[in-house]
Amino acid sequence: MNSSNVYFTNMRVKPGDSLQKKLTRLITAAGMGKIHFEDQFSAIKMHFGELGNLAFLRHQYAKTIADFVKSQGGKPFLTDANTLYVGGRKNALEHLDTAYLNGFSPLQTGCQILIADGLKGTDEVLVPVEGGEYVKEAKVARALMDADIIISLTHFKVHEATGIGGTLKNIGMGGGSRAGKMEMHSAGKPLTDSEKCIGCGQCTKVCAHHAITVTNKKAAIDHEKCVGCGRCIGVCPKDAICPANDEVEEILNKKIVEYSWAILHNRPQFHISLVVSVSPYCDCHEENDTPVVPDVGMFASFDPIALDQACADAVNQQIILPGSELDGKAKQGDDYFTALFPNCSWRTQIAHGEKMGLGTKEYELITVK
């Protein structure tokens, strides 16, 4: 396969310029305007950040992308799917509250927000995955599959489970419904916490397989009957039901790629990653640690594999920031992601993405002023 073009610009600006203008120049040079946007629903898939975390991308970057789409006649909307874990984005109402508090209101971004998998994370489309090793039918958040065009806007960072938090992670894991996230994260079924359970029975009402019973005001899940759909997690008012989170990292990364394939295959797409505030943990945390390397810049490409590879290479070429989580664990020239999380198997994402036909790790880096 031939190499793919990845476009790059740094975070330096002179008086009279701005990062938003640089981002517009970047995506213009990278050819985003070649996509036919006229009257097309354009999903801008991003992460709105957990409350308390300050490493997520600022809303001004989302507005820049939305404005560009509108200038091309498109109909942009910002979107993400509900989380599997307990937090401020577990259902659509709390998810929207979090997004607004973090600056992603329609007035600030110039477009609407849709939570892609609905109120409780159950609004999904079953998408066959041709050639999937572990996923035969992905459970994808419906709004992503209803969109005509997929644009990913990613905060590239380190990730404790997948090694890199890049484009594939943003699309694949972020685009799965609650049941889809359960499938990616778990080899097993959800578990109950008897200390938190109040025996309200909400979980029994949504279980289509009669796998949950309540005895003495405590719920129990029969794993012989449970299919791992995750609906019980979404309705529990006390967060007493949680996923097993027991999938090995290599398989987790392959599943993320296979979900990305389900969302992106044969669809107009474009991908943008900002390598800034490179935190050592996911933006899903309610806190963020100091960055492990300096801010690098903004990257864009039609190829999600080349983009993730270019961003990872760029991070590994940086100095290590003193006092960060990486300080003392690696030296310049090491693989920083593996130094922080030795079992992360991040290169599996790249290799499996190539195998699935999502792109190539070979790239030409083109600098935009």
Image: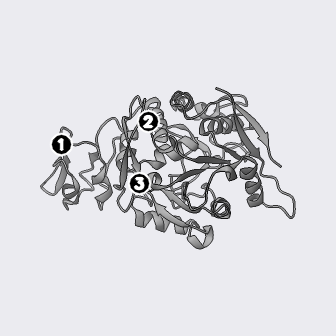
Q: Which numbered mark, 2 or 3, is in the foreground of this view?
A: 3
Q: Residue at coordinates 77% horizontally, 52% vertically from top-left?
A: 11
Q: Is residue 82 visible?
A: no
Q: Is residue 258 visible?
A: yes
Q: Residue at coordinates 54% horizontally, 41% vertically from top-left?
A: 168
The residue carrying mark 2 is 255
In this rendering, position of residue 69 left or right of residue 199 = right
Spatial CA distance of label 2 from label 1 is 25 Å
Spatial CA distance of label 2 from label 3 is 19 Å
Of the residues under marks 2 and 1, which one precedes in the sequence? 1
As drawn, 103 above or below 322: below
Of the residues under marks 2 and 3, which one precedes in the sequence? 3
In this rendering, position of residue 19 left or right of residue 267 = right
Res 142 label? 3
Q: Which numbered mark, 3 or 1, is in the foreground of this view?
A: 3
Where residue 284 sits: x, y (%)? 50, 52
As drawn, 310 above or below 196: above
Where residue 319 sits: x, y (%)? 75, 38
| Closer to us: 268 or 251 | 268
